[in-house]
């Protein structure tokens, strides 16, 4: 299992639970983060991005850590955060879910759809 598969499985299991909590209290759920990631990946794929490409992503301060920044990693609230990423692989997303349905583990909450 790679990092993306692991994250998508976590997002599937965690759904609406917070994945990111900004210092100002704003949250992004696992489900929302997975949807945003999928949209970005689709955009890059449609633009011809392939394995071996290098991508530079710049985030304005308000989108990275908010106006307070992140002192732990020495990012001020006025800093633009820049990520350099190498594309190591790409997969086509599934059109629909695959796999075998399994019963939830004992002790987990269950939802009954009526």
Image (cartoon, rainbow, N blue to C red):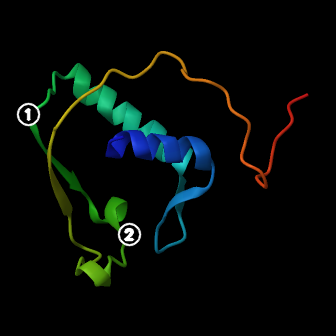
Q: Residue at x 53, y 17 (%)?
A: 96
Tell how many labels: 2
Asked if marks 2 and 1 touch (Cβ < 8 Å), the reply is no
- How busy is the neighbourhood of tag 2: few (under 14 within 10 Å), some, or many (20 plus)? some
Q: Earlier in the sequence, mark 2 or mark 1?
A: 1
Give the residue at mark 1: 52
Q: Which residue is mark 2?
A: 66
Closest to the observer, 98 or 61 = 98
- Determine which of the numbered discs, if any, sits on residue 20 in the image: none
Distance (Cα) linking label 2 and label 1: 32 Å
Query: Depth check: 28 or 95 in front?
Result: 95
Given the current orientation, which residue lies at the most extreme right position?
114
Q: Secondary structure at mark 2?
A: loop
- Judge whether 38 appears above or below 69 on screen: above
Task: Identify the image quadrant of the N terminus.
Answer: top left
Of 92 and 61, nearer the camera is 92
Give residue 59's quadrant in the image.
bottom left
Query: Going 35% across and 64% down the picture, which residue do you hit?
Result: 62
Please, which residue is most extreme toward the top here?
Answer: 95
Residue 84 placed where, x, y %? 13, 52
Look at 54% across and 20% down and name the residue there: 98
- Mark 1: few/some/many CA within 10 Å (<14, 14-19, 20+): few
Quadrant location, the C terminus = top right
Tell which tag, 2 or 1, sits nearer the viewer: 1
User: Is 97 placed above or below 84 here?
Assistant: above
Q: Is residue 92 left or right of residue 90?
A: right
Residue 107, image x and y in percent? 79, 55
User: In x, y percent, where is residue 11?
Assistant: 52, 45
Q: Secondary structure at mark 1?
A: loop
Q: Position of residue 57 (x, y in %)?
A: 19, 49
Question: Quarter-wise, where is residue 40 in the image?
Answer: top left
21 left or right of 46? right
């Amino acid at each position: 299992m790679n990092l993306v598969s692991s994250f998508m499985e976590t997002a599937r299991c965690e759904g609406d639970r917070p994945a990111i909590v900004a210092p100002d209290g704003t949250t992004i759920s696992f489900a929302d983060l997975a949807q945003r990631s999928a949209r970005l990946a689709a955009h890059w794929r449609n633009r011809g991005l392939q394995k071996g490409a290098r991508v530079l992503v710049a985030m304005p301060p308000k989108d990275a850590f908010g106006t307070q920044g992140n002192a732990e990693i020495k990012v001020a609230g006025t800093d633009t955060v820049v990520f350099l990423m190498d594309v190591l692989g790409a997969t086509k997303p599934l059109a629909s879910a695959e796999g075998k349905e399994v019963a939830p583990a004992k002790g987990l909450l269950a939802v009954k759809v009526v």
